[in-house]
Image (tube, rainbow, N blue to C red):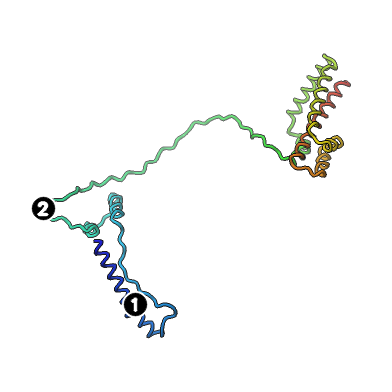
Amino acid sequence: RMVQEDIERSDSLLLSTTVNEQLVRPMIDASFGGPVGDYPVVMIGRPDEIPIAELVSLLQWGGPQGLKVRAQDIYDRAGLTPPEPGDETVGVLAQPQPVQPSHDLPGEQRPAQALPGRASPPTTATSREAADGGKGAQENTGNDAPAEELHVRVGRLLSLHVQEDGPGVIEIMTRRLARNAERALGDLPDQVRKELEQASSLDDLSERLEMMGLDDEAFGNAMQAGVLIAQLAGEASVLGGLKRG
């Protein structure tokens, strides 16, 4: 079969050459006086046949699904001869395979689960956002009722301790505030500490630090120290009121 295909391809090539030289070129010269560029080419060939392996695979999978072909075509394609009556043959008749229906899994229903609530993890604010955090905290006073209640309760409890133990508790807490303030200011440069001491508010401190041209890390550290000093100043004011009371 392969020799036959080679002969057919060789004959097709010779026939294409003859047609182009004896027919196509004289027709172009007689009709148009010559080609514009190259002469057109007529190609004659034979169709390529699919490989035997692909044909066998097609019959293997397509036959059970209802694909029908002539047995003689298979013999011709494979280069075999159909057996005659009385010939010894090899092979058995394949049994048709039943078509299996699609297997659909039933839907799975899971019982409802009561999951605990999840809080969003805290995010680290940038140094510039920290500068605006003071204003945001002052504006969002409507949602801080539980925190204010707790602050009031702590204040009342502290007042009871002051009334019972005298000014000793206030002195201890005042010294603690002084140590915290000293630690907050200890790592700052002298110029930043000076601006921090002269600032009247967090906004004023932010403007002073921006005029100094600090980088983001130094700016953030200074603003964090400013927020801490503001908190310590508020606590010291509360302790002063308790001491006077």
Q: Residue 182: x, y in percent?
A: 81, 28
**Crowdedness of circle 2 by 10 Å Cα count: few (<14), some, many (20+)?**
few
Residue drawn at (19%, 48%) of the image: 91
Kindly identify the residue that appears in the image at 85 percent across and 22 percent down.
Answer: 242
- The image quarter containing residue 205 is top right
Q: Residue at x 32, y 71 (%)?
A: 44
Residue at the limit of the structure toward the right, as seen here: 244
Q: Nearer the viewer, residue 10 or 120?
A: 10
Instruction: Out of 227 and 160, give the one closest to the viewer.
Output: 227
* Nearest to N terminus: mark 2 or mark 1: 1
* Position of residue 176 in the picture relative to residue 69 (left or right): right
In the image, residue 81 sits, relative to residue 237, either above or below, namely below
Percent x, y of residue 193? 83, 35
Q: Is residue 127 left or right of residue 18?
A: right
Mark sitting on residue 86:
2
Q: Is residue 89 left or right of residue 172?
A: left
Packing grade of label 1 (10 A; few <14, some 14-19, many >=20) is some
Q: Nearer the viewer, residue 96 or 50?
A: 50
Where does the C terminus fall, quadrant-wise? Answer: top right
Name the residue located 30 percent from the left edge and 50 percent from the top edge: 61
Q: Which residue is mark 1?
A: 20
Q: Amino acid at mark 1?
A: Asn
Kind of residue sitting beneath label 2: Gly
Q: Position of residue 133 (x, y in %)?
A: 76, 38
Question: Does residue 102 sit above or below 231 in this rendering?
Answer: below
In which quadrant of the rendered view does residue 138 lie? top right
